[in-house]
Image (cartoon, grey):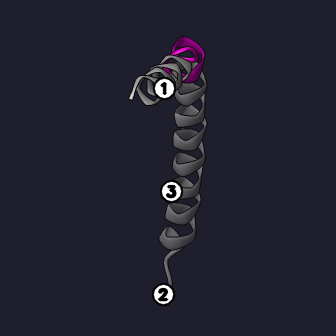
Amino acid sequence: MKSNKIPATSKLVAKFDQQLMDILREDLRSFKAKNQFLGINKQEAAKHRLSAA
């Protein structure tokens, strides 16, 4: 007798994976929104270091 646990488990894992990806994407969007000027400041600092040298 075969069991249907494998397809159900697979569906559960796929659903969990999708939900996790959605959460991670939202967190990344929030992080980028909060830190959008951080990368610009680093780039500006690098330009000033290069021009001073």
| Residue 52 x, y percent position in the rendering | 42, 22
Identify the residue shown where x is 56% and y is 20%.
40
Q: Earlier in the sequence, mark 1 or mark 2?
A: 2
Q: In which quarter of the image is residue 8?
A: bottom right
User: What amino acid is at disc 1?
Assistant: Ser
Residue 43: x percent and y percent? 52, 26
First in sequence: mark 2 vs mark 3: 2
Q: Nearer the viewer, residue 41 or 25?
A: 41
Secondary structure, mark 3, is: helix
Look at discs 1 and 3 and give the one toward the viewer: 1
Check contact, mark 1 vs mark 2: CB within 8 A: no
- Residue at label 1? 51
Label annotation for residue 1: 2
Identify the disc placed on residue 18. Answer: none
Asked if the stretch drawn in magenta spans residue 34, the answer is yes
Tag 3: residue type?
Answer: Val
User: Eyeballing the image, is 35 above or below 10?
Assistant: above
Taking the magenta stretch, the answer to whether it contains residue 46 is no
Camera-nearest label, 1 or 2: 1
Check the image and report above or below for 9 versus 49: below
In this view, 24 is above or below 44: below
* Res 13 label: 3
Q: Nearer the viewer, residue 24 or 51?
A: 51
How far is disc 2 from disc 3 in space, using C-alphas? 24 Å
Residue appearing at x 52%, y 47% in the figure? 16
Q: For this rendering, which residue is in front, 1 or 6?
A: 6
Say what amino acid the circle numbered 2 marks: Met
Residue at 50% x, 56% y is 13
Q: Distance between the residues labelled 1 and 3?
A: 53 Å
Residue interval drawn in magenta: 32-38
